[in-house]
Image (tube, helix red, strand yellow):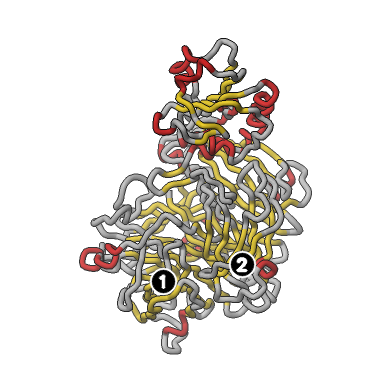
Amino acid sequence: MPLTIETFSNVKGGNSFYKAISHPLAAHKTTVLIETLSQGGPVAVYDPLGFYSGFTEFYDVAGVTIVQSFVQDTARIGSELAGHTAQPVTDLPDTTAKILLIAAFDAQKLRDHIGHLIPDSCSVYSFDDCRLDDALLTVQRDYLDSRNFATNFAFFRDDAGARTRISTANYWSGYGADSVTLHLILFGEDGEILAEWDEQLGAGVAAVTIDSQEIRERFDLSDFIGQLFIHAIGVAGHDIVKYALDVWDDAGTELSCTHDANAWPSELYAGLPAPRDGEEVALWVQNSHPAPIPAGEVGFNLMGNDDIEWLDEPIAGFATRKLIINDMLPDAHWPQQIEVQAGKHFVRPRYEITSSQNTRRMAHVNVERSDLKPDPGIADLGNLMGKGYILPAPILPMESWLSTVLPTPMATCQNDLPIAALLIDASGREVARHDFGKLPRDHETALDIGSVLNGDQSLPSGSGHMELIYDFANGGDTDGWLHSVFRYENRETGHAAETSFGAHIFNTVLTYRDEPQSYNGPPPGLSTRLFLRLGFAPLDTICHLIYPASTPWHPTSDTKLTLMDNEGAEIAQQKVNIPCGGSIHLRYIECFDAADRRKASDGAYIVVRDTTCRLFGYHGLLAESGAFSLDHMFGF
């Protein structure tokens, strides 16, 4: 059964209690607390905030003798709690328990409320006995403040020449943070801790680079495959840990980039492409919790098919397991796609595809939402919002790359996808349109962009972008959560990359629900600040910036590319103007001259800033061998 704890709500945001109770450094203290309760009982549980059931999702309390449970809310009296019928806390004076467990953090105030009810013979414990050390807290006066749990996970390996590198910046300093530290825990494949250390971030918006080879040498590690837990301390502005993750190998067979893991585990993930002939598709499942994932909790099925293949083995706490989709679903084939039954046990996982040419690429699946319903209001947005929801993606220079789009159902209510694809030249001129019609949930439709151009192998400008939009000509329901996988292939070498994302409303002053989305604050989001990490020599960096507009906006963007060194100092600046509705394809070596690139050195990055419009960006690395990576950029 899936975990019943709420990890994230699109209304309330993230659940800090979930992060607090599942934090790796809380696990040992919690084990000690449970042993104390087991040896000193019997125990009564007081659950004023409704946290106790979430606690037991991650920790085994079978050895604790619980004799009574108490609540404060009269509506919960008589409900089942800790294996007993919940009593009003005013019955506490008659308890036979020797220990009272208050199921809350910052419990002193709650204890004071009932102090006159606690028998003198009763010892009192609370979740405060599982608190992180004060040195790990940003806001000590409020333990469940979301800034105390600015955490995330990253796939991390250094194995047989396969490397990883995390790149980000101290963007919290831009929100007023004075001193930010990353507390890092590296878990091996079996879930055991391989290394634990702190990284003090530089002042200002300094670059942050965590390289697997450097970590391996620093801690004298052998080959490893696992995950890196990242806990940011001293943050300001928001509690999100964002990063770009580069994956490559010394042999040149792999060069991929992906991004942060979305720190909230989901019950379902989707957008996992089935293998083509000669391909192996593997999903890297990485347990995000101290408790093992039981056998039969992780499963796979073809999208639109209820026949699920379940993994019949457990996965240890914080362990990593490589699952071969070809073995789990041997009849699955591209362009079918696969739904992941995750049970809220792990954050958004990566998948890795090995081709018959022995090239590899990595990308991630997306959260499939179960809380959405069809929204008939979206079909009526046209008069006010023009195109409305837009899902933009690059069409890379067509003489070098093939571009393919695979629309992906990403909510359980999406039984059909009424969409069309617009092909738009870099100048902003629409040159072709493909009507998908009303795709069923189990569709097998992948569109080769070149096939829409009447045999032409190029756009007028050589590059451009595609936009997936809703098309209700044939009816259909929608909810605004439109997603797709975008696959790109080097025509000469066969190297490939893929990325995926969802639709938003862009560049209109009118708002609909939470659109146009804003990075910080309420909608509309009408400006841009994107992080572009740069490849270490000899890799070049590519960047594809798109200026999508649901309604006509400023005729051109006013976009500044600021080259920063790894300490956050400005080296140089370039300005580009992108036509409204158009795009631009850039290469680092063409944007800044050799002198500026030498001065910036390794670890540099670019800030893409525009105060006049919202841009959507994709970035990647390019090797001389033809290997390349591509993923969407993150903003802050």
Q: Is residue 583 above or below residue 226?
A: below
Amino acid residing under circle 2:
Ala
Q: Secondary structure at mark 1?
A: strand
Q: Quadrant of residue 215?
A: top right
* Secondary structure of the residue carrying numbered label 2: loop
Q: Residue at x 32, y 59 (%)?
A: 558
| Residue position marked by numbered label 1 in the rendering | 416
- Circle 1 packing at 10 Å, graded few (<14), some (14-19), many (20+), is some
Q: Is residue 285 above or below residue 236?
A: below
Report the residue that reaches farthest toward the bottom.
455
Foreground tag (2 vs 1): 1
Pinpoint residue 409: horizontal percent, then vertical percent. 46, 67
Q: Position of residue 165 (x, y in %)?
A: 62, 52
User: Residue 238: percent from the left, percent from the top?
Assistant: 43, 41
> Which amino acid type is marked by label 1?
Asp
Residue farthest to the left? 383
